[in-house]
């Protein structure tokens, strides 16, 4: 069975390093950790630097908060206190 070749690309949203198959270069991929969608591109390319600088830290944080809010992960709703 042939082995796949991988490269490492940082997720532009959560910043984690992902191992991406070279077959996916130029295609949309999804981060396994945060669910962000972005284009797989080789390190050092113009698209790679655009992906990594396109979102500021605050924008990345906002995106993660929106994703968590939409999925309900790690967030609790304000529950009114029970009357005694």
Image (cartoon, helix red, strand yellow):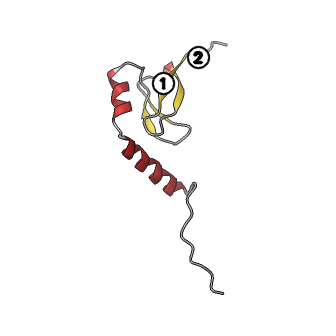
* Figure quadrant of the N terminus: top right
Q: Which residue is mark 2?
A: 4
Secondary structure at badge 1 equals: helix
Q: Is residue 74 left or right of residue 56?
A: right
Residue 8 lies, with reference to residue 68, above or below; the image says above
| Residue 33 % position (x, y) | 55, 39
Q: Residue 78's mark?
A: none
* Figure quadrant of the C terminus: bottom right
Q: From the viewer's side, name the closer residue of 5 and 73.
A: 73
> At x 51% / y 42%, what residue is drawn?
35
Which badge, 1 or 2, comes first in the chain's sequence? 2
| Residue 12 % position (x, y) | 42, 35
Q: From the viewer's side, name the closer residue of 64 and 22.
A: 64
Secondary structure at badge 2 equals: loop
Residue 81 lies, with reference to residue 15, above or below; the image says below
> At x 47% / y 26%, what residue is drawn?
9
| Residue 39 % position (x, y) | 41, 30
Q: Residue furthest bottom?
A: 84
The answer to which quarter of the image holds residue 27 is top left
Q: Which residue is mark 1?
A: 24
Mark 2 residue crowding within 10 angstroms, few (<14) / some (14–19) / many (20+): few
> At x 50% / y 57%, what residue is drawn?
69
Residue 43 lies, with reference to residue 37, above or below; the image says above
Q: How many marks?
A: 2
**How far, Cα to Cα, is label 1 from label 2?**
11 Å
Q: From the viewer's side, name the closer residue of 42 and 27.
A: 42
């Amino acid at each position: 069975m042939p082995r796949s070749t991988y490269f490492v690309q940082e997720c532009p949203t959560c910043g984690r390093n992902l191992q991406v198959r070279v077959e996916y270069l130029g295609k949309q991929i999804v981060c396994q950790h945060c669910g962000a969608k972005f284009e797989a591109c080789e390190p050092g390319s113009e698209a790679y630097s655009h992906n990594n600088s396109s979102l500021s830290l605050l924008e990345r944080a906002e995106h993660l908060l929106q994703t968590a809010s939409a999925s309900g992960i790690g967030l609790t709703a304000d529950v009114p206190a029970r009357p005694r």
